[in-house]
Amino acid sequence: MATAGGATLEAVGVRAGFGAATVLHGVDVSVGSGEVVAILGLNGAGKSVTLKVLAGLLPARAGTVRLDGEDVTALSPEQRVGRGMGHVLQGRHVFGELTVEQNLRLGAYLLRRKSPAAYQPALAGVLDRFPRLAERRSQLAGSLSGGEQAMLAVGRALMGGPRIVLVDEPTAGLSPLVSAGLVDTLEATRETGVTMLLVEQNTRFALDLADRILVMRQGVVVHDAPTDKVDHDDLAELLGIGRLLSASVAKPAAPEAAVATKKATPRKKAVAKKKATVERAAAKKVSPKKTATPKKAAPRKTGLTKKKAAVKKASSRKSTAAK
Amino acid sequence: MTYRPTRRQVTALAVVVAAIVLPPLLSRLIPGVFTDARASMLGIGVTYAAMALSLNLLMGYAGQISLGHGALLATGAYTSGILTGRYGWSYMFGVMVAMVMGAAIAFIVGLPALRLRGIYLAITTLGFAAVMDAAILKIPYLSRGSAGVELPRPVANTFIFTENADYLALILVITTVVWLLDANVVRTKLGRAFFGIREDERVAQSFGVDVARYKMIAFMLSGALAGLAGAMHGHLLLFVESRTFAFPLFSLTIVAFVVIGGLGSRVGVVVAAASFGVVPQLLRAVQGWDLILGSALLIFAMARHPGGVAGAIAEAREKKEIRAARRQGEEDDASTQPLPDLAALPLPISDTPTATSGPLLEVRDIHVTFGGLKAVDGADLVVPEGKIIGLIGPNGAGKTTLFNTISGFVTPDAGVLKLRGNDIGALAPHQRAQAGLGRTFQLVGLAKRLSVHQNLLLAQHARANYGLISSLAYLPRAGRTEADLEARATEALEAIGFAEFADRPIDQLSGGQQRIVEIACALMNAPDLLMLDEPSAGMAPGVIESLALRLRQLRDELGRTILIIEHHIPLVMDVCDEVWVMASGRTLAHGSPQEVIARTDVIEAYLGAPTLAGVGGVPRSAAAGLGRPAARGMGG
Amino acid sequence: MGQALVSGVVVGGIFGLLAVGIVLVYKGARVINFAQAEIGTFCLYVAYFVVDGDDGLGLPWIVGALAALVIGGLVSFAFERLVVRRMFGAERLSVAVATIGLLLLLFSLELKFFGSAPRFLAKPIDGLGPKVFGIFVSPTQLLALVAALAIGFGLTAFLQRTDFGLGVLAAAEDANAARLVGVPLARVSAFSWTVAGALSVIAAVLVEPTIGIFFPGVMTLLFVPALAAALVGGLSSIAGAFVGGLVIGVVDQVVRYLFLGSSIAAPEIIASFLVILVVLLIRPQGLLARRAA
């Protein structure tokens, strides 16, 4: 079952829920290699649940999840991690009673079993990328500042050399200062070409970081477009904070019905970033030298603007039926 | 109003009367079959059932774990034994004092332990039982060397219960009374308060339940019943010593009865305890295997059905329902069921809020710190009477923390809270609820495993003004009040269109449905100030519209005051008279909705942008410069 | 008094081992394993069967001890596999009740096959032992002390220094996060329960010479002080539990010494209970636990 464009992570027609309640009603997500995709949505839209299903923490009741073309729907979270899925969890989920280095070592838990020799270079790579962690190497993670813990969480996720990192609401519950630090951390990570899927409430943060934005509402993806194709007003409308913005530019309030017309999914190939891919290939080896590549890389969005994302009306329920 | 018993009640009554009358009768008709030993064996089943009922009240209803119930049983048995055996008291008085002693010991142990939750109460009670076993029961006055205590069965200087079969009838009567008391607990505010505490202490408090007090009541009631059960058991055996309630096995075994029967299931625990009391004795013939088989069965039962007998039955019923639903081609999916139209919100009872000159709620300079993080950092808020006030702001701005501070769940480091000019800063959450604060929670604040109907009754806790005795005996006063609450609950159910969901547990409703029930519950007490934390989360657009309509109606027609945290801006624009904006723990601005949302600093705060110079002004320009902000300070 | 302190440390090491077992399971599964101590008693009977010349096989002490260790680990391992794992999503109380079932099962097996009469094992080493500063330290006490310390330190080192050990600690702190770096939770759980079972056996075999006899349920008598020890460490710290064991052990022996001949029965149990109360009232997170950041 070859997938178009060879998406790194792809979910098709995923339905899931808790007990009697269905939360996801056929969700399609696809993240290309080297791409950074953000899922936006209000509380209860199903963002975090989507991430749970992708991670394998919640079973999909229907639909498929593929990692590099391989169907992983039936695999456990551990098995998915073994196949190249990294995680940055919501809040500060570092192991507070362990040292920074022990945390990083755990990040390479499976790597150390597969190829023990790869551990030292990986560690050196991460410590190189986050010098602050190198300074705090033997300190207990619980004693780090919020920003450093966030950094450690990202560093830990990168230790195994993941194909994709799932980031769950990185700024939730963090103070603005810490959030800002985390933004820098994630940006630096993106510049090295790591593929990421993040769920975020902070709209601005997501717009800054992502190549592509998905908007979820009531368990379905209602909008999917490259970041610079996202009209700010439309986005606000989709999120349900429309009138706030509209009113501020003295426009009449837009009716809610606008949402319905925005159901769209772009072509999967719409996003291809050669530069990032090259960098990613370099970063995959995580050699200390390679991380010296300039942090602020060339304008990465040029490729995006030229390719118009084709917009098609796609009922997500249909794809479930097709499956 | 004439009382008509149902068919089931008549059958139950017949069975109970037969059970009570048969033992004395049979022992006289067929003494060869219904021997004294067999009567005693059945008696053990009965006393075990009484013990299980006592622990079930504490663990199953109130959710407090006691691993030392054996100590309370011993208290009862020794008390009654010493009074009847050594001082010649009548059985009935001995047993009554045993109950008082049980309650008193529970009070003493409960004082330090009930402050703490879960595992710690369990450890304290276990430790107390160890002390009881090793030290207290070894006191010579109690132990008489190793002779123990004899428990005769004198009633007014006659020994009419000498025969085990007759005594069996007596303890069956007493246990039936306990059963009825237990049923009264469940159907009054007492039981609902216990359930509320078990499900979520905060929710119970928000409905006005004094959690500390009700936990103590539960423990003392359980202690009294344990004293009773222990005394009955002792008088059945005619003799107790320290090994009768051997530590820790006896206490743990009763815990096992309750969990096997199914926590909170009266029928389940009685069946489990009675059968574990009787069946192993039948296996006595196979020397020693009774306990082995029993404990193996216990492990197996837990592994297969962690919810016990009651849990297994419920599971089976659920499966059957799902299968039935599948057959009809229906998805078993609460969220696809049509959300009832919000025809109305339950209307507050006649007492209209008393108008005062000043603002209803006044919040001044509140500061809250969590482990170094300033969650609320100098927030002000003024809520005038009869208005709907919105509180908006980005995630993590401190809105919910401020809510929790107002309702008393969070103690601020500094600041003033006034309701109608009275300082409420020193009041406990349940007292604030009783003073007129009603609220909902961000993560739906309802007792999740109770039905919609039960939640609507629990929500009226503060209005159920009858006492403990009325509860236990279900006196007319309690009956009248309950009928009243019942009527209001039914009214509310119909108003919100939930009549057909009345008996459905909350956790089987969709998020939006839960919200509606939660708001209805908060309104049941006709609060002076209704505080709603993100009421529209999880609601369908249509329902949000009718919610807005109902909120306006509450204000305009009934003069109610509402404070609302909301992300859904259209709703805020729609209903709010005034909006306060929070960001980074501070109240940033306030004014009419139109004024507030036109302010650029508000928009910045709302979109969650880090403070930076480049993207000020109109959002259009922000859209144009969507790329990346030019510079950002490195944090941490 | 000096003698009391010495035996306090020895008994404390044994409480410590039991407490570490309780903590290991509690951290991982949020369950108090009520059978924790009784596994030790059960395996004393296994050792007795192997070692005793009249009732059993008459093999050397060390063979009996090893057999006990293996059986103890196996019982615990099997319980985790067959019961705990099946109850993954169940109420923790139900799992705790299943461990009560295990306690009752072991107890009833002991009773069925060996009766309630007390038994004793041959001592591993005989003699009164050296006298240090006027205090007798018997060889068995010395063995107990050395073994307890070695196991305490060895276990800590294993947990801190190996990948799997770190995985165990990580899983205890945040199972979900550990799972998502690839720590095999199932194996971590099996490890915790098995080691806890083995610790119980070691504690039993080491303490038996000091008590002198054993009978069904004997180790469960030590369960409350062991729980108090675990609580002193806050139910979360392995090292804290071990130190808590030493504290409770010394309190136990000193109180016994001070109240020798008094009319108060079991003053040491009262002392344990008072320690529990004090800890819960003053610092429910444990006397030795780090203050949460």
Image (cartoon, rainbow, N blue to C red):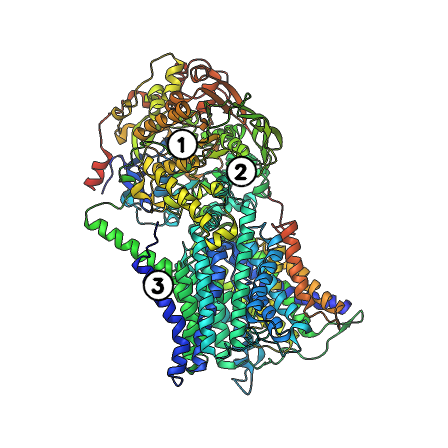
Q: Which residue is mark 1?
A: B535
Q: Secondary structure at mark 2?
A: helix
In the rendered view, would you say A138 is above or below A311? below
Task: Please tell me whether mark 3 sits on a helix, a strand or a loop.
Answer: helix
Q: Amino acid at mark 3?
A: Ala
**Is residue A160 in view?**
yes
Q: Which residue is mark 2?
A: A149
Q: Give residue B308's position: percent from left, percent from top.
A: 39, 61
How packed mark 3 is, by other alpha carbons closer than 10 Å (few <14, some 14-19, many 20 or more), is: few
Residue, x 39% and y 36% (percent of image)?
B520
Task: Identify the residue position indicated by label 3 in the image.
Answer: B12
- The numbered dot on residue B185 is none
The amino acid marked with disc number 1 is Pro
**Residue B146 relative to residue B385: left or right:** right
> Can you see residue A299?
no
Give residue A150's position: percent from left, percent from top: 51, 36
**The numbered mark 1 sits on a residue in which chain?**
B
Secondary element at image label 1? loop
Label 2 and label 3: CA atoms lie apart by 63 Å
- Dot in front, 2 or 1: 1
